Image: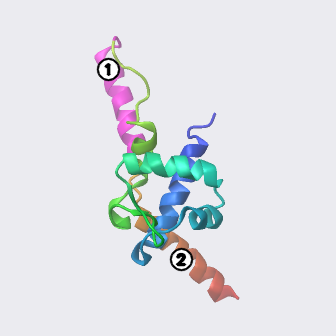
């Protein structure tokens, strides 16, 4: 059973690329697509959704492209999930007993906590991996 769609996988990859280049200004779609191995046509649609979710901004012109709307330390994976798929819920709890409603609400809360990781956390993790690889050579 897959929990997440390709949309989430590619969306996170796009945000990750924008986060790594946050201080460099807008990044062109082609560069994001190549760097993160995302089909460019699909990426274009995704970036529109990410813009509508208030996670990225677009800049027009020759030096234009996309950039994060906020810093990498203030965007979580949960923000992405909610922006692309909506609020996390197991199912409509209406009509079940209070105990079961509370149980499923607790599951949703714990599941959401798994995605409090920020884009900056992911960048820091990548830096650790690169440092280990470089050190071993």
The answer to whether mark 2 and mark 1 are in CB contact below 8 A is no
Q: Residue at the spot x=29%, y=18% of the render?
A: 98
Provide the residue designation for mark 2. 128
Q: Quadrant of the C terminus?
A: bottom right
Q: Residues within 10 Å of mark 2 (few under 14, many from 20)?
A: few
Of 53 and 110, which appears nearest the observer? 53
Q: Which residues are magenta?
A: 95-114
Question: What is the count of numbered marks?
Answer: 2
Q: Residues within 10 Å of mark 1 (few under 14, many from 20)?
A: few
Provide the residue designation for mark 1. 99
Where does residue 67 sit, x and y in percent of width and height? Answer: 42, 64
Q: Is residue 135 visible in the rendered structure shown here?
A: yes
Left or right, residue 28 beside residue 116: right
Q: Main secondary structure of the magenta part?
A: helix
Give the quarter of the image for residue 105: top left
Where does residue 118 sit, x and y in percent of width and height? Answer: 40, 61
Query: Closer to the camera: disc 2 or disc 1?
Result: 2
Where does residue 117 sit, x and y in percent of width and height? Answer: 41, 58
Where does residue 10 sit, x and y in percent of width and height? Answer: 57, 52
Q: Is residue 75 magenta?
A: no
Left or right, residue 79 beside residue 63: left
Q: Residue at the spot x=67%, y=86% of the render?
A: 136
Q: Is residue 92 above or below residue 41?
A: above
Q: Residue furthest top?
A: 95
Q: Is residue 110 magenta?
A: yes
Q: Residue at the spot x=42%, y=63% of the render?
A: 60
**Element under disc 2:** helix
Q: Is residue 113 visible in the rendered structure shown here?
A: no
């Amino acid at each position: 059973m897959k929990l997440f769609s390709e949309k989430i996988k590619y969306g996170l990859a796009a945000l990750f690329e924008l986060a790594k280049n946050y201080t460099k200004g807008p990044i062109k779609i082609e560069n994001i697509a190549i760097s993160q191995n995302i089909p460019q046509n699909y990426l274009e649609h995704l970036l529109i959704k990410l813009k509508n979710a208030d996670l990225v901004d677009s800049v027009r012109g020759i030096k234009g492209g996309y950039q994060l709307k906020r810093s990498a330390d203030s965007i979580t994976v949960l923000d992405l999930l909610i922006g692309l798929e909506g609020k996390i819920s197991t199912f409509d709890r209406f009509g079940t007993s209070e105990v079961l409603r509370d149980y499923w609400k607790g599951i949703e809360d714990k599941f959401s906590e798994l995605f409090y990781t920020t884009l900056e956390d992911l960048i820091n993790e990548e830096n650790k991996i690169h440092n280990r690889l470089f050190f071993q050579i």
